[in-house]
Image: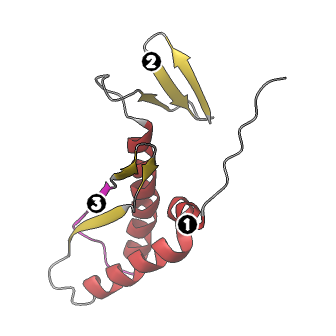
């Protein structure tokens, strides 16, 4: 992952060439770093929950979520809350049970982003010589 200042603000770019614009919150069409962190939590969970639920034969009609956190200090977030929004398929009485089991398992064991936040991953800053 590469993050750099550009003429238009800041951009994060992955090795596949995808880009995300970033800023302080005043720029139109740009995410703040905190918004990207919350999107990473949501994205990690949802891109894992959806295929695992579908593989078990319970394709959800709608799967979305809201991810939120409040700052408890000027530079520190409090708990991150992931709230799922789900529409279950009609005539599938086990879909809710399967979805809930998968969502809990993904959060507890499979989502690298959530697990890293909960465990407290160390961030190392390297400066040029």
Left or right, 90 with reference to 36? left
**Residue 65: numbered disc:** 3
Q: In this picture, is 62 found above or below 33?
A: below
Q: What residue lies at 45% left-to-right and 49% top-to-bottom? A: 76
Q: Quadrant of the C terminus?
A: top right
Q: CA distance from mark 3 to mark 1?
A: 18 Å
Please state which of residues 76 and 55 is positioned toward the viewer in this rendering.
Answer: 76
Disc 1 marks which residue?
115
Of marks 3 and 2, which one's residue comes earlier in the chain? 2
Disc 2 marks which residue?
9
Residue 92: x %, y % from top left = 21, 85
Q: Determine whether the residue tagged by mark 2 lies in a helix, strand or loop.
A: strand
The segment highlighted magenta reads: 56-68
Q: What residue lies at 39% left-to-right and 28% top-to-bottom? A: 24
Left or right, 61 with reference to 69? left
Kindly indicate the quadrant of the structure image that contains residue 31.
Answer: top left
């Amino acid at each position: 992952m590469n993050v750099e200042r550009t003429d238009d603000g800041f951009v994060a770019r992955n090795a596949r060439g995808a880009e995300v614009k970033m800023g302080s919150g005043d720029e139109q069409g740009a995410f703040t770093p905190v918004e990207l962190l919350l999107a990473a939590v949501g994205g990690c969970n949802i891109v894992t929950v959806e295929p695992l639920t579908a593989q078990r034969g319970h394709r959800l009609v709608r799967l979305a979520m809201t991810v939120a956190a409040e700052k408890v200090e000027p530079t520190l977030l409090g708990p991150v809350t992931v709230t799922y929004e789900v529409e279950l398929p009609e005539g599938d009485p086990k879909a809710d049970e399967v979805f809930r089991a998968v969502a809990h398992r993904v959060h507890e064991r499979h989502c690298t982003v959530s697990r890293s936040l909960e465990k407290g991953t160390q961030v190392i800053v390297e400066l040029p010589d």
